[in-house]
Amino acid sequence: MSEDRKIKNNAESKRDKDGAVYYIRGRRTVEGRQFQRYAVATHFIERGEDYLKVLKQYIQPLYQEGDIISMSEKVISMCQDNTVEMKDVKLGFWAKFLSKFAMKSSAGIGMNEPYKLQLAINMKGLPLVLWASFCSGIGKIFHKRGIFYEIVGQDVAGIDGFYSHSAFETYHTLAVLNPKEPEKVCENIKNELGYSCILADANDLNIEILGLSPDLREKGDAYAIDLIGDNPAGQDDELTPFIIIREIKENQEDDMEK
């Protein structure tokens, strides 16, 4: 675990309210208003769980009217069982070859993992991946990054998993894809639970907004990114996939119980 990850889930920021554990993540000023973010700790959410039940279990004890809930895309995809097991990915020559030239990223496992690259080939076809790899190579000459994912698309960029370093053995041999119908998921959560929500694919380098509840769509992706641009959910192993975003006054205490 990196030093940055240790800092995010530290003892000083940890709180417990009525059995619900959360971490104070710090304030953000958006559109002249201050928002505190609370990272809510959960169990390891397995494939096939009901995301409405999970949200209700962990958010309801802490929720106040007006809160916005940011959700990790990985959790929703696990609930949908939108996953691929490594044993079902047949590794080919091009994935083995091209992965040798892919850049490593501090944000997680990238296309330098042959099985992840093979999955991209399976999803998008070899010709597009070859073209994206060629363009990416040219881009590196001019110090431009991200060209590969611009060409192959966000669904490939959103592949998560095959993490041999993860504390959770499930992720060693499992890839998690982007959630199915993310806007519909957010709409369902708003209708069933009343939560305004953001569904995001976030890491310490980039934030992609996949879905917004209907009441937030007018605000747009830029507003949502402003609220969670520092990735308050953290990377990989924190088990804090839900963030409660709450508007607070300047002199208001950060602790929910004060």
Image: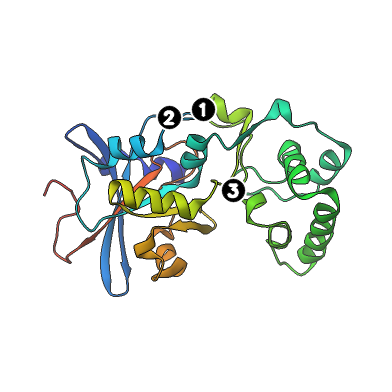
Q: Residue at x 20, y 53 (%)?
A: 254
Q: Residue furthest bottom?
A: 32
Q: Residue 172: tell me if it is visible.
A: yes
CB contact under 8 Å: marks 1 and 2 = yes
Label 2, label 3: how many angstroms apart (C-alpha)? 23 Å
What mark, if any, has residue 44 been given in the picture?
Answer: 2
User: Do callouts 2 and 3 mark residues in contact (Cβ within 8 Å)?
Assistant: no
Numbered disc 2: secondary structure: loop
Q: Amino acid at mark 2?
A: Phe
Mark toward the start of the polypeptide (2 vs 3): 2
Q: Position of residue 187 (x, y in %)?
A: 40, 54
Q: Gap in Å between the C-alphas at discs 1 and 3?
A: 18 Å
Circle nearer the viewer, 1 or 2: 2
Residue 139 found in image quarter: bottom right
Q: Say which amino acid is labelled 1.
A: Phe
Q: Which residue is mark 3?
A: 106
Tell me the SS state at disc 3: loop
Q: Is residue 110 above or below residue 30?
A: above
* Amino acid type, callout 3: Ser
Which callout, 2 or 3, points to the residue nearer the camera?
A: 2
Residue at screen point 86% across, 42% down: 94
Specify the label residue 77 is tagged with: none
Residue drawn 85% across the image and 54% down it: 130
Residue 232 visible to the viewer? no
Q: What secondary structure is found at the residue carrying circle 1?
A: loop
Dot 1 corresponds to which residue? Answer: 168
Pointer 2: residues within 10 angstroms few (<14), some, or many (20+)? some
